[in-house]
C-alpha cells in the first residue's frame, strides 16, 4: 500500500456505527470546502462539498457540517461500512480563487 | 468513462536522469494540475494550467516543468530528478466554471529517485 498515511491520526470505528471526522481549516476567507476519500493505491475521490453560506449539507450516508466561527469542518458517515476504510481529508478554497488548500487527512479504520 | 490517466504508475530512476510523467483527461476540462503527496502532508500543488498554452507555478514548482500543448494532456517533466523528488504524484482536472464541484484525480504515480 501507499505510505502517505504513515503519520496520520487514525479513527477506528465498529462497522455499523457512525463516524465523525474533523478538520480545522486555516483561512477565514475560505468560501468553499470539499471532503475527499483516498483509498490505498488510488487517487483522491470527491465525496461532498459545501459553500460557506451553508452550515450543513447532506449526501448519501454522509453529512458535512461547517462552523465558521471556529473554522471547523466535520464529515459524518452514517452506518460505517468496511468499504469506508480510507484516508479522508478536507480541502478549502480561499477567496473564490482556483486554488485549493488540502489538509493532511485522517485514516478511518472500520472494524468488522 | 470520465477519467484522468497517468503513466507510468510506478517509476524507479536515478539522480539526474530526465523523466516525464504523462497525464491525460477525457472530460474536456480546461483546468489541469499536478500535485505531490508526501507522508503526513497534504497535497501540494506543483504546477497548474488554466487552458492550452497557459501554465503557472503552484506552491512547490522547483525542479519541475510542465507543458500544455493540447487540452487533454498535461505532462510533468523532471529534467534532473533528485532524491527529494521521491513522492507520490497526482494529476487532476476540473471545469473552470466557478471553480466549484468535483476535481478528478488520476490514480497516482509513485516515483523513487535513488
Image: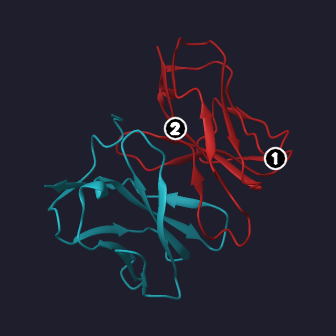
Chain colours: A cyan, B red
Name which quarter of the figure residue A108 lies in: bottom left
**According to the image, label 2 marks what residue?**
B108
The answer to whether residue B24 is above or below residue A44 is above
The answer to whether residue A84 is above or below residue B43 is below
| Residues at marks 2 and 1, CA–CA distance in whole angstroms | 20 Å
Q: Please, what secondary structure does the residue beneath circle 2 have?
A: loop
Which percent across, then down, holds residue A2?
36, 35
Q: Residues within 10 Å of mark 2 (few under 14, many from 20)?
A: many
Which percent across, then down, holds residue B12?
50, 16
The answer to which of A110 and A29 lies nearer the viewer is: A110
Residue positioned 57% across, 44% down in the render: B106
Left or right of A75? Residue B23 is right
Residue positioned 52% across, 83% down in the render: A52
| Mark seen at residue B21 | none
Name which quarter of the figure residue A73 lies in: bottom left
- Whether discs 2 and 1 lie on one chain: the answer is yes
Name which quarter of the figure residue A88 lies in: bottom left
Chain letter of the residue carrying label 2: B
**According to the image, label 1 marks what residue?**
B71
Chain letter of the residue carrying label 1: B
Amino acid at each position: 500500500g501507499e505510505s502517505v498515511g504513515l503519520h496520520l491520526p487514525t479513527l477506528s470505528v465498529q462497522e455499523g456505527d457512525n463516524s465523525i471526522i474533523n478538520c480545522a481549516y486555516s483561512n477565514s476567507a475560505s468560501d468553499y470546502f470539499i471532503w475527499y476519500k483516498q483509498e490505498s493505491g488510488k487517487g483522491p475521490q470527491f465525496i461532498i462539498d459545501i459553500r460557506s453560506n451553508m452550515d450543513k449539507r447532506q449526501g448519501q450516508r454522509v453529512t458535512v457540517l461547517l462552523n465558521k466561527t471556529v473554522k471547523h469542518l466535520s464529515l459524518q458517515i452514517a452506518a460505517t461500512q468496511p468499504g469506508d476504510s480510507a484516508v479522508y481529508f478536507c480541502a478549502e478554497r480561499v477567496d473564490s480563487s482556483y486554488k485549493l488548500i488540502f489538509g493532511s487527512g485522517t485514516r478511518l479504520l472500520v472494524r468488522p | 468513462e470520465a477519467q484522468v490517466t497517468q503513466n507510468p504508475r510506478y517509476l524507479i530512476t536515478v539522480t539526474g536522469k530526465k523523466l516525464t510523467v504523462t497525464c491525460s483527461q477525457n472530460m474536456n476540462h480546461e483546468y489541469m494540475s499536478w500535485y505531490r503527496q508526501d507522508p503526513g502532508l497534504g497535497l501540494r500543488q506543483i504546477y497548474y494550467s488554466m487552458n492550452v498554452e497557459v501554465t503557472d507555478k503552484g506552491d512547490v514548482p522547483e525542479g519541475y516543468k510542465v507543458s500544455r500543448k493540447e487540452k487533454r494532456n498535461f505532462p510533468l517533466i523532471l529534467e534532473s530528478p533528485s532524491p527529494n523528488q521521491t513522492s507520490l504524484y497526482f494529476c487532476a482536472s476540473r471545469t473552470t466554471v466557478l471553480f466549484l464541484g468535483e476535481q478528478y484525480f488520476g490514480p497516482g504515480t509513485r516515483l523513487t529517485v535513488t
